[in-house]
Structures are given as C-alpha cells and as structure tokens.
Amino acid sequence: MLITAIKTTQVISQDQFVNGARDAVLDALDSYVRGLTGHPKTLGATDAELPALFEGIDTHARLVHTRLAAAEVLSPTPNGLHVEAV
C-alpha cells in the first residue's frame, strides 16, 4: 500500500480524517483478500458489509483524530499536518 506525503499546509478535519481512514482500510483489505485468492477483482468487503465495517473504522478514526488534535506536539505534526479539532 502506497502512503502519499501530505502537503505541509494541509489542515485535516475530522470528516476528512475518517474518509481517509476508510479509504486506507478498504485498500488494505482489498489487497489482502486479492493476495489470498489470487483474483485481482476480489473485494475485501461487499456493499452489504460496508456499513458494519465503516462503523468500526469511523469510531476508531474519530478517536485517533481527537487524540492528534489534542496533542500540542502533534498539531502541527512534524510533517506539517494541522489536525483541526471539530
């Protein structure tokens, strides 16, 4: 999984953080399942499974975002990310 650098002036809201976490987990899960099955189009979650998956991801991502926003040494982070407390 490729992690891209974040622009030094970017401010990330809680919604952006949650959506990014969703994307990262879905990409990782798809890659994992595709590696196991050998089928390049196999998905790690179906549309019907997404609500349950997102519930867990969203809850955890909100906790992480809150922790980062509250940590003075992490806002801005060493790479310049400003975490917006929402």
Image: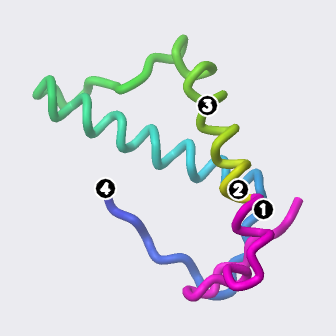
Q: State the CA–CA distance, disc 1 to disc 4.
A: 23 Å
Picture coordinates of residue 12 (x, y %)?
72, 67
Instruction: Say what secondary structure mark 2 lies in.
Output: helix
The residue to which callout 2 is attached is 16
The residue to which callout 4 is attached is 1
Residue appearing at x 77%, y 82% in the figure: 72
The residue to which callout 3 is attached is 56
Which picture quadrant has residue 50?
top right
Residue 13 shows which numbered tag? 1
Q: State the CA–CA distance, disc 2 to disc 3.
A: 16 Å
Determine the residue located farthest toward the top in the rendered image.
Answer: 48
What's under tag 4, amino acid-wise? Met
Query: Could you tell me which quadrant the N terminus lies in?
Result: bottom left
Q: State the CA–CA distance, disc 2 to disc 1.
A: 5 Å
Determine the residue located farthest toward the left in the rendered image.
Answer: 38
What's under tag 2, amino acid-wise? Gln
Residue range of the region highlighted in magenta in the rendering? 66-86
Q: Nearer the viewer, mark 3 or mark 4?
A: 3
Give whichever of discs 1 and 4 has the lower sequence position: 4
